[in-house]
Amino acid sequence: MQKLIDGYRRFRAEIFPGMRDHFHLLAESQSPQFLFITCCDSRVVPDLIFQTEPGDMFLCRNVGNVVPPAGELGRGGTSATIEYAVEVLKVPHIIICGHSDCGAVRAAMQPELARHLPLVRPWLHYVEEAQAVGTRALPSTCNSDAELRECVHANVVGQLANLRTHASVARALAAHTLQIHGWYYDILSGAVEAYAPDQRAFVPLESTTATQ
Ligand code: ZN
């Protein structure tokens, strides 16, 4: 706990004074441009990776960066977050970002890893189902980094398809007020890739606007 308390002290003493005007503007309203849906993994830190500031990103995190499909099964925190971001905050962009070495995707491929986790196990079905959306055959295992990377890619593409099933998202896409993006973050290199639907492949983020 001391690490958090020491960090908080530094924030109040050294960081906050320099951002006082920024926080003053944010104190009564927010207008984030991005709903960023990513995994809970502690190594994925969106504000650090994209150099964003308080007020820029509306964040939604869960194990495996899952978007349950709309409908009865999809009722829950993630779906409510999406609806709020689109209907109330009117974010122009939603990003679903997977990452390398994702334990959730690995566990979805190797169910024995989640055998003793009765709440995680059914949640991972969303990962399995999403991966099945892709047309390409997936590796049957994810023992190597390359195999796992392919499975994480497939999960991102599948969750994008789930995202489109939400009524608020479908309406905003039809009205051209929303764009959705699928990204992949590599922890080792710090590189981000974006899904390019026309190429059915992930390409360096810098090379595309990732419009979908
Ligand atoms: Zn993960």
Image (cartoon, rainbow, N blue to C red):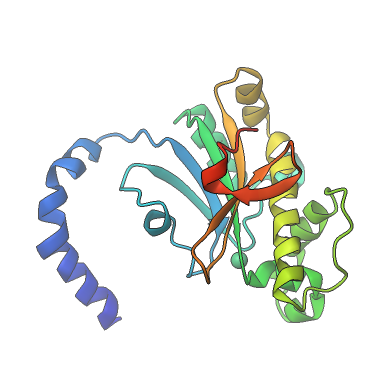
- Of residues 131 and 100, the one drawn nearer to the viewer in this rendering: 100
Quarter occupied by the N terminus: bottom left
The answer to whether 43 appears left or right of 106 in the picture is: left
Where residue 156 appears, x then y in whole percent? 68, 52
Identify the residue at horizontal 47%, vertical 49% (top origin).
59
Residue 68 seen by the camera? no
The answer to whether 32 appears left or right of 71 in the picture is: left
Identify the residue at horizontal 71%, vertical 56% (top origin).
153
Where residue 21 appears, x then y in whole percent? 13, 41
Where is ligand 1, by quadrant?
Answer: bottom right
Residue 34 seen by the camera? yes
- Of residues 74 and 38, the one drawn nearer to the viewer in this rendering: 38
Of all residues, the one furthest to the front in this rendering is 207
The answer to whether 167 appears left or right of 21 in the picture is: right
Identify the residue at horizontal 55%, vertical 47% (top origin).
205
Quarter occupied by the C terminus: top right
Where residue 137 appears, x then y in whole percent? 89, 57
The answer to whether 110 appears left or right of 55 in the picture is: right
Identify the residue at horizontal 83%, vertical 48% (top origin).
133
- Of residues 116 and 86, the one drawn nearer to the viewer in this rendering: 86
In the rendered picture of this protein, how many numbered marks are placed on residues?
0
